[in-house]
Image (tube, rainbow, N blue to C red):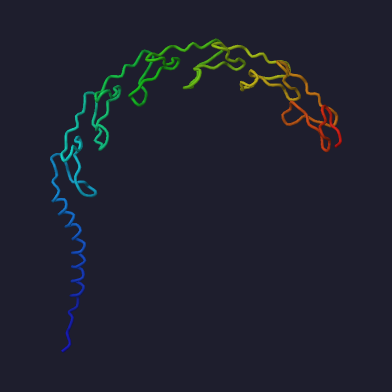
Amino acid sequence: MSSTRRPGVTTVCGAFLLALAGAVPGLLFAKDILSVAIPANAHVQRYGSGWECNPGYRKAKEACAAVRVPANAYPTDTSYGTGWECSRGYQEVDKACISIKVPPNAYLDASGDRWKCDRGYRRIDKTCVAITVPANGYLTESSYGSDWQCDRGHRAVGEACVAITVPANGYLTESSYRSGWECDRGFRAVDQACIAVEVPEHAHLDYSGNDWQCDHPYRKQQHRCAVP
């Protein structure tokens, strides 16, 4: 006599086995959690296994100890460092928050844990000293080198701005090369003067404008151009 298979039995059994297989890891994970002793002021980690301390507490061996936040500080609720930071205007010294002494003509910077001098002052030790800008000079925003620069047409000599003497056939430049001036095209600098470039026959001024080169196919021979 042939056996008969009732419709749907196989499908129901398969679904049950799949559901059971999916639930087993969760059951095992729950068993692992229950087997771990969670101390006071702690909770089960959201990801992974084990536990972690509540905000305001730090792990100390197998317990959670309260973070002691000193005066003029606030808790950070981080798992690293001290667990607190000093308030704006204070800095950490020996696990305490000490008020930052801002000298006259200074201000707290954006970080709130250090100070900078006002514009027109430079830091010397723990004070801000006024910058002496010479005549024909102006303040700069530079954080290095001099705090001032000379106006156009002047150059720094010590603590003063001296007018630049531009020779005939010369012009001012922004460069400090040759004391702030260069010669016009067709002239070359000799000492503090601009001397005309003598261009020989079969030659022309070069790209720089302060020397010459021979026309093709001539070649330079001392101070003239000759056929090779």
Looking at the figure, which quarter contains the N terminus? bottom left
In this orientation, which residue lies closer to the viewer: 124 or 207?
124
Q: Residue at x 49, y 17 (%)?
A: 147
When the figure is inspected, residue 49 is found, relative to residue 159, above or below; the finding is below
Q: Residue 127 at x, y = what percent? A: 38, 13
Q: Residue 13 at x, y = what percent? A: 18, 71
Q: Residue 22 at x, y = what percent? A: 21, 62
Instruction: Decide if residue 69 is on the left or right side of residue 167.
Output: left
Instruction: Decide if residue 159 is on the left or right side of residue 172.
Output: left
When the figure is inspected, residue 117 is found, relative to residue 59, above or below; the finding is above
| Residue farthest to the bottom, as pictured | 1
Q: Residue at x 51, y 12 (%)?
A: 133
Q: Residue at x 18, y 46 (%)?
A: 44
When the figure is inspected, residue 39 is found, relative to residue 18, above or below; the finding is above
Q: Residue 172 at x, y = what percent? A: 65, 19
Count of marks overlaid on the render? 0
Looking at the figure, which quarter contains the C terminus? top right
Q: Residue at x 18, y 75 (%)?
A: 9
Please tell me in which quadrant of the rendered image residue 135 appears.
top right
